[in-house]
Image (cartoon, rainbow, N blue to C red):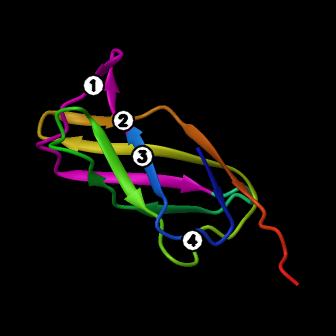
Amino acid sequence: MGMHVNDVGTYICIQFLDDGEALDISAATALTLVIKKPGGTVFLRTPTLSTDGVDGRVQYRVQTGEVDEVGEWAVQGRCELPDGAWTTEEGTFWVFTNLDIA
């Protein structure tokens, strides 16, 4: 996945897995994305379910001003369910520069 600096509306999508199988997160009491910029700044965002949650997929729509650094970004999901808590593996994506328009 890749974005460009100042992109808005792009979705960051991840899937929660348990032993390689989709984790049913339809009853999640909390969902969090931990996003780390190339410069080391970490911020948290609340994703939404991509479907009904049975497939373990969540998404977050990037807002104005959030994508402000070029380089490799990292993302990790956290989910709290009535019977436990899960964390995804760390994923990465690239943010690229834009051409200057004179």
Give the residue pinned by disc 4. 66
Q: Residue at x 33, y 56 (%)?
A: 47
Is mark 2 in CB contact (under 8 Å) with mark 4?
no
Mark sitting on residue 42: none
How far is disc 3 from disc 2 in space, using C-alphas? 7 Å
Is mark 3 in CB contact (under 8 Å) with mark 2?
yes
Boundaries of the magenta span: 15-36
Q: Residue at x 58, y 78 (%)?
A: 65
Give the residue pinned by disc 2. 15
Quadrant where the C terminus is found in the figure: bottom right
Mark 1 residue type: Ala
Counting residues from the start of the chain, the first of labels 4 and 1 encountered is 1
Q: Residue at x 17, y 46 (%)?
A: 28
Is mark 4 in CB contact (under 8 Å) with mark 1?
no
Mark sitting on residue 13: 3
Q: Residues within 10 Å of mark 4 (few under 14, many from 20)?
A: few
